[in-house]
Amino acid sequence: MPRMMTLDLNLPQVLIAYHSHGGNTRKMAEALAQAVSDTGCEAILETVGESAMEKLPSVDGLLLGSPCYFGSMATPVKQFLDDSIKFFGKGMLVGKAAGVFCSTGNIGGGGETTLISMTLGLMIHGMVIQGIKSGGHFGPLAIGEPDERVLAECRDYGEQFSGLVKTLFADLY
């Protein structure tokens, strides 16, 4: 069940939108949301869908997460990106911070291709993509259930992402 953390309109807002069938991607999303919150941004944690889509134009950043299915993102995440076409060409997402995270079943299971494919859609919108300085350079990637190393990477990435959001929108807050 998606949940929304209490919104504070005086803080930059980050939408963490994800799909999770078995719970692994959800655990990563929760770790990211906690780090984003702990480092001075408001975290909005939601599964992909209409509610998350409607928040997209008003938030300052997006972290998008998916399990890897056959070397690509899950259908609900692809649908989320496809539905975001309604914002394309209107400047609503240009310059906003974006990043991705993924869980997959095994090494070589397509996790990196999933991260890259999600990134492509965000770049086409003109969003500013945050890489990660260590670990999975394209974004946090879990092989199976996220262990403490992956959760620590999520926390580091969430902190780094918050820094990007605050830098991009420093004049607004």
Image (spheres, grey):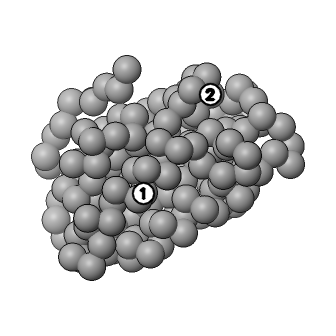
Please state which of residues 38 and 120 is positioned toward the viewer in this rendering.
120
Quadrant where the image shows the N terminus = top left
Task: Check the image and report above or below for 154 versus 123.
Answer: above
Residue 2 location in percent, x, y?
35, 26
Residue 11 image label: none
Could you tell whether 130 is left or right of 143 in the image? left
Residue at 27 percent of width and 54 percent of height:
56
Q: Is residue 34 visible?
A: yes
Quadrant in which residue 60 is drawn: bottom left
Residue at 25 percent of width and 39 percent of height:
51
Q: Amino acid at mark 1?
A: Leu
Could you tell whether 82 is left or right of 25 in the image? left
Q: Kindly indicate whether the residue at mark 1 contacts the one at mark 2 (C-beta within 8 angstroms).
A: no
Residue at 27 percent of width and 30 percent of height:
4
CA neighbours of label 1 inside 10 A, class few (<14), some (14 to 19), many (20+): some
Task: Check the image and report above or below for 117 versus 12.
Answer: below
Residue 29 location in percent, x, y?
50, 35
Quadrant in which residue 145 is drawn: top right
Could you tell whether 41 is left or right of 101 in the image? left
Residue 81 image label: 1
- Judging by the rendered image, the residue that carries numbered circle 2 is 24
Residue 155 location in percent, x, y?
55, 40
Residue at 75 percent of width and 30 percent of height:
144
CA neighbours of label 2 inside 10 A, class few (<14), some (14 to 19), many (20+): many
Task: Check the image and report above or below for 23 versus 87.
Answer: above
Judged by depth in the image, the label closer to the viewer, 2 or 1, is 1
